[in-house]
Image (cartoon, helix red, strand yellow):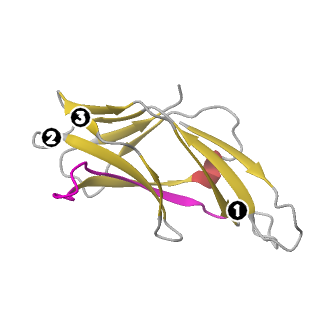
Amino acid sequence: MFRLHRTRPAAKSSSGEKIDFRFSYFKAIQVPKGWDKLVVSIISVETGKTIVKTSKAGVRNGSCQWTENLSESIWTALQDESSKEQEDCLFKFVVAMGSARSGGILGEATANMASYMSSNDSVPVSFPLKKCSHGTILQVSSY
C-alpha cells in the first residue's frame, strides 16, 4: 500500500524532511446501494489540505476499484530533534461521491504514515471507514 522514501533537505536551515509516498490498488468493499461513483481524497491532518485524490470510479456489486497509482511528495517534520522519536504524520482517507453536485461523504479513515517509514516493502492495509454505518472498508495495497 504505502511506499515511503525520505530525503533530507539540502540546506541545513530548512527543517523537516521530504517524504515521497506512493499509494496503489485502492478498493472499497461493502459499498451500499445508491453510491454509484466514488473518489478517494488523501488529506493532511496537520494542514487540512487535500494532497492528492483519485479519479472517479464506478461501483459494481458493492465494490469500487481504482486502477491508478497516486504519488506525491510533502515536507514534514517527522523527527523530534530533542527526543529523536518520530512524530506523527497523519493522513485522512476520505471516500466520497464522485459527483460534484451531491458532495456526499461515505466515510473516512486516518493513518499515521510515520509508522510505515521503517519499511521498504509495500504494506497492504484495510481501513474500516469511520462515520459510515454501512461497514464499508477501504483497502489499499501495492501492485
Answer left or right for 76 relative to 52: right
Q: Is residue 93 magenta?
A: yes
Please tell me whether residue 86 belongs to the stretch shown in magenta: no
Occupied quadrant, residue 110: bottom left
Mark 3 or mark 2, earlier in chain: 2
- In the depicted structure, whether residue 87 falls above or below residue 40: below
- In front: 76, or 102? 102
Residue carrying label 3 = 58
Give, as a three-letter code, the residue at label 3: Gly
Residue type at tag 2: Pro
Residue 18 x, y percent position in the rendering: 72, 57
**Kind of residue at disc 1:** Leu
| Secondary element type, mark 3 | strand
| Disc 1: which residue | 78
Label 1 or label 3, whichever lies nearer to me, is 3
> Badge 2: how crowded within 10 Å, few (<14), some, or many (20+)?
some
> Which residue has dot 2 on it?
32
Q: Earlier in the sequence, mark 2 or mark 1?
A: 2
User: In this rendering, is residue 104 above or below 126?
Assistant: below
Residue located 37% across and 48% down the image: 40
Q: Is residue 143 left or right of residue 17?
A: left
How far across and how far down the image is residue 41, in percent? 40, 53
Residue 58 location (% of width, % of height): 23, 34
Q: Secondary structure at mark 2?
A: loop
Magenta part of the chain: 87-104
